[in-house]
Image: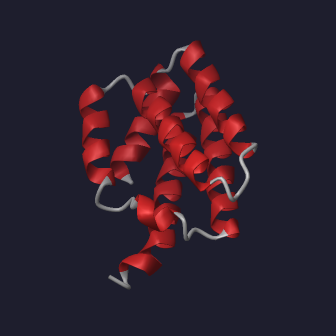
Amino acid sequence: MALEGFATAQAAIRASDEEIASIVASTRARSELGFEDISDRLTSNRELHGLIFAASGNERLVDSIRKNMQYYFAHRFAQFVSREEAALFQKQHELIADAIAARDPREAELLARQHVKSTYLAFEKFYKLL
């Protein structure tokens, strides 16, 4: 939560207008995907987060996030995310994009932390089965 929150706050501060436009466009495009489009949702999720992290302007931070994500984000469990969880994740993405576009680093960080926690909690039920 700390790493992704910090990167998102930095994106709100450092992102170029073009990067913000890409983040907003990517977020909107995700809202057009159907719940059944698991592969597309996973790909677009990775791309959206990548855009946000890149906009932080801190490659070491991005590298740390990518290494850390392997410990809690499991693609094989993503297919078991409920419709409600998927809708929550999309709403969180929209709020994060709005905060970045508003150049509000505090809100962006808070929302990113909440999003990581929501993701972890959704996957936690599957980790307990391992």
Residue 102 appears in the rendering: no
Q: Quadrant of the N terminus?
A: bottom left
Number of residue marks: 0
Which residue sits at x=46%, y=70%?
123
Question: Closer to the camera, 118 or 72?
Answer: 72
Across and down, in percent, residue 38 comes to: 59, 55
Residue sitting at x 47%, y 53% = 113
Estimate the x, y position of residue 80 in percent, counting from the top left: 55, 71
Relative to 62, 45 lies left or right: right
In this rendering, would 12 be left or right of 102?
left
Q: Nearer the viewer, residue 21 or 30?
A: 30
* Front one among 94 and 81: 81
Q: Is residue 82 above or below residue 109?
A: below
Which color scheme does this rendered protein use? Answer: secondary structure
Q: Position of residue 35 (x, y in %)?
A: 70, 58
Quarter occupied by residue 36:
bottom right
Q: Nearer the viewer, residue 51 or 10?
A: 51
Residue 57 position, x and y percent, is 37, 22
